[in-house]
Amino acid sequence: MAKPLLISGCAELVTLRGSAPRRGRQLADLGIIRDGALLVRNGRIAAVGRRQDVLRDTSARRVAILDLGGRVVLPGFVDSHTHLVFAASRTEEYEKRISGASYEEIERAGGGILSSVKKLRAASHDDLRDRAIAALRRFAEHGATTIEAKSGYGLDAKSELATLRLHRELASSQPLGIVSTFLGAHVVPPEFRKRRNGREEYVEFLCRKLIPQIASEGLADFCDVFCDRGAFTVAQARKVLTAARACGMGVRIHADQLTRTAAARLAVELHAASADHLEEIIASDIRALARSDTVATLLPGCRFHLGLPQKAPARKLIEAGAIVALATDYNPGTSPTLSMSMILSLACNHLRMSPAEAIAAATINAAYSLRKHATIGSLEVGKYADLAVFDVADHREIPYYFGVNLCVLTMKRGNLIHARAGAGLR
């Protein structure tokens, strides 16, 4: 059995200790311990506090020691909305958007999600796996220790099942935590678009065949639906998510991204774990979310990459008492970033969240949205030793230096999964 590990030399130990989820003013309470230390034993946190107090623990006298030299320690980021498995980038669309083409124009021309569907169906398992493994390494390099991964670029039984099985393979073969989500209701696949009632037939196929099979094999923790203009209606989303819930799966929803559809209200009605995007919600939607346990997961990287002016109403959500989380929305078309630090910068600058609010939204509240808050998302005794170390002396510097990766060390369950060469860790 490995020795316990004492991690000391923390200029700020950002614990996020306390209740979960965080709402309102609580969102800015980071539970910072200055000159802090952690004792890790068997992958979990055995002690946390000021260095001098942790050192009084008798077991701390026979330990391996990691001196961080005055850096900031956070809980590992929990990226609660990603599209991990895809076959290729969509750089050609990026260039078209810069020239003035809209998201819908690109989709009508054969681009968008259906372009990724075509590429994924043609890709080999090994190519998809290798691309995903490379992405997971980069997530770790940026301080993420757990991600949610959605399917949704296959849109037929063979490809969707293969994606979900790849999620399971990756979860067991590399260190990052992966929570798997079935997003078969991303858009209507091309073969169903040719049919007179193709949209309804596809929904029936998902509800009667694919969702029960996925549930029986335990391939997904959650089911998601893209409920928006050009995708699925509220009635169709309700049908898919109700079928998933009946099979024992949790539910999530892409809500009110391009237009106001009242999908956020559907999320509240179905007690969804999370409603994501929310750029087009109105005051009554905000009030409904604030009265619920559905997390409002904001994805500022998407609007930034698309160059769209409307931003999610983060301040109104926080002030109303909603549970706000942040995620990258890593995907090939609208948010090709793996950097939660960059998302923090966008949340601060564009959504007017404070650095403390953004950090809590990307850790403990994101963990709550995945229903993993009992074991991850904060640095407390008994939780997994999932943490990220940043080469700064103040947590506010992490979003301040936008576009700069200051993460020098990432640890998952007490195991080192990333350490930057030349960082001077002792």
Image (cartoon, rainbow, N blue to C red):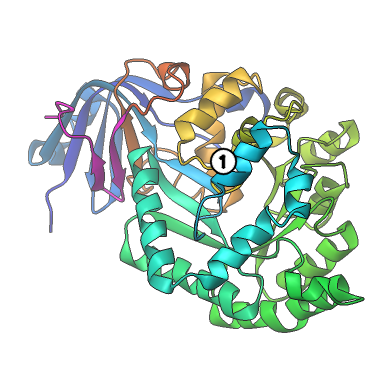
Q: Looking at the rendering, in which quadrant would you find the C terminus?
A: top left
> x%, y% of residue 152?
63, 63
State the residue in front, 134 or 149.
Answer: 134
Quarter occupied by residue 389? top left
Determine if the magenta segment contains residue 409. yes
Q: Is 323 drawn above or below residue 267 in the view shown?
A: above
Does residue 117 appear left or right of residue 411 in this picture? right
Determine if the magenta segment contains residue 373. no
Which residue is painted at 57% across and 49% down in the image? 90
Q: Is 6 drawn above or below residue 253 in the view shown?
A: above
State the residue in front, 207 or 372.
Answer: 207
> x%, y% of residue 204?
81, 78
Does residue 204 appear left or right of residue 151 in this picture? right
State the residue in front, 27 or 305.
Answer: 305
Q: Residue 334, can we see it?
A: no
| Residue at disc 1, secondary structure | loop
Q: Looking at the rendering, in which quadrant would you find the N terminus?
A: bottom left
> x%, y% of residue 318?
70, 27
Does residue 111 appear left or right of residue 121 in this picture? right
Q: Is 32 drawn above or below residue 417 in the view shown?
A: above
Which residue is painted at 51% across and 45% down in the image? 79
The tally of labels here is: 1
Question: Mark 1 is on which residue type?
Answer: Ala
Q: Residue 123, can we see it?
A: yes
Quarter occupied by residue 60? top left
> x%, y% of residue 368?
57, 47
Q: Residues within 10 Å of mark 1 (few under 14, many from 20)?
A: many
Q: Is 371 drawn above or below residue 151 in the view shown?
A: above
**In the image, farthest residue toward the left:** 62
Query: Which residue bears the numbered disc 1?
Result: 327
The residue range painted magenta reads 407-426
